[in-house]
Amino acid sequence: MKLLLIPFSYIFRIIVFIRNILYNKGFLKVNELTPNVISVGNIAAGGTGKTPFVELLAEYLLDKGKFIVIVLKGYKREHDDMKVVELGFQNENHELNIENFGDEAFVLLENLSKIKSGKGLLVVGDEKTKAAKFASVKFKPEIIIIDDGFQHRKLYRDLDIVIINPHQNKHLIPAGNLREPVKNIHRANIIVVNNKFDKDIINENIQNKPRIICNYEFEGFINIKNETLSAAEITKAAVFCGIGEPGSFIKLLEGLNIKIREFIKFPDHHYFSINDINKIIESYNKSGAKYVLTTQKDFVRIKNSEVVLKAASDNAYKNLLFNYPLYYAKIKMQINQNAELLHKEIDDLLN
C-alpha cells in the first residue's frame, strides 16, 4: 500500500523544496523577536522525543535562574484560543483541562511543577509565531523555547535543535513519516540522536554537525494517588497507549521483564471515549494481570479530561483511575554524550 503512496511523497517533496527556497531567498518573511528563541524540532512526524528534550532544556535554563516561555501548539485541542499558565501551577481545583491545553503541555506542567529557581510560562496556541510574539511583548522573557519548531520557518530562531531517531524512515509523507528530506537537517545548529530505550548507544554519522546522544531513563510507575511502583513488583500487565511510536513503550516494558498479556494501541493524541475506557477495563479483566500500564501522555489525557473533572458522579474514567491498578511509566530524557555542546551553545546565547 505504501508503494502506491510514493508518487504523492514526491509531490510533497517538491512542495517542501519550493517552500524552503522561498524562505532561503527571502521571499517569505521571517519574524525576529527580542528574546532569544530556541527551536526544538524534528524531520519526522511524531515519536522522536521533542517534548522530553524541551523539558530537559527548560530545567537547565530554570536552574540558572532564567525567565523562560515554552510555546506549544497543543495538538488536537478542542478549543483553539491561546492559553497561558505559569510553570509550578498546581491544578488542584481543575481549572485546566486537556481540551484547552493538550497533553504535551500537561506533561511539561507536571514534570516542571517543582522548579526551585527561575520562572517559566507555558503558552499554548495554534499559531506558534502569534503565540511567541504575544509572549515576547506581554511577558518579556529571556528565552523562548518553541516545541516542534523546525518546519516553522516564519519565526527566526537563535538556536535550531533537531532530534532524530536512529534508522528512521526514509520516505516523506504520506508513504513514510518524514516531513522533509533527511539532508535538510543541515539547517540545524545541533542534532540530537535519541536512542530512547536502546541499551547500545547508536550515534548516526552526520557529517560536520555537532551531535548530542540521548536516551530515556525509566524512573518508576506512578498512579493517581502519586504512589510509586518499581518494575520489580510487576511481572505481567495489561497495556495501552496512544503515542507516536508505541514500539518504544513496548521495548521499555520488555526491557523491564514485564510480560504484556494484553496490548491496545490507540492513535497519537487520542481522545479516550467511554467505549475506549470500557475496552481497556475489559482487556485488563480478561488478561489475568495485576496491573494496567500506560504512558504519562495517555495518563494525563484521561486524568485531566473535561469529562472526568466536571463529572458530578463516578463514571468510566474515574472508575479506571481510582478503582483499577492503573500506573503510568515515568521517564526522563538524559544526555549520554556531548552535553557540553548543548550547554556551550545555550551559555553563549545567555551571554
Image (cartoon, rainbow, N blue to C red):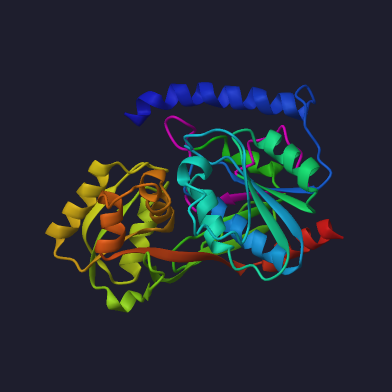
Q: Residue at x 77, y 43 (%)?
A: 138
Nearer to us in this view, 181 or 275: 275
- Quick one: quadrant of the N terminus? top left
Q: Residue at x 51, y 41 (%)?
A: 100
Q: Quadrant of residue 193?
A: bottom right
Please give the range of residues in magenta.
148-177
Q: Position of residue 324 (x, y in %)?
A: 24, 63
Q: Position of residue 279 (x, y in %)?
A: 20, 48
- Quick one: quadrant of the C terminus? bottom right
Q: Is residue 61 above or below residue 177?
A: below
Q: Position of residue 305 (x, y in %)?
A: 41, 47
Q: Position of residue 266 (x, y in %)?
A: 32, 44
Is residue 165 at all visible to an observer of this figure? no
Which residue reaches farthest front? Answer: 312
Membership of 266 in magenta stretch: no
Q: Is residue 245 above or below residue 115?
A: above
Which residue reaches farthest right? Answer: 351
Side (left or right) of 170 relative to 144: left
Which residue reaches farthest bottom? Answer: 232
Membership of 159 in magenta stretch: yes
Q: Quadrant of residue 295?
A: bottom left
Q: Quadrant of residue 66?
A: bottom right
Is residue 69 at all visible to an observer of this figure? yes
Side (left or right) of 31 relative to 269: right
Nearer to us in this view, 124 or 183: 124
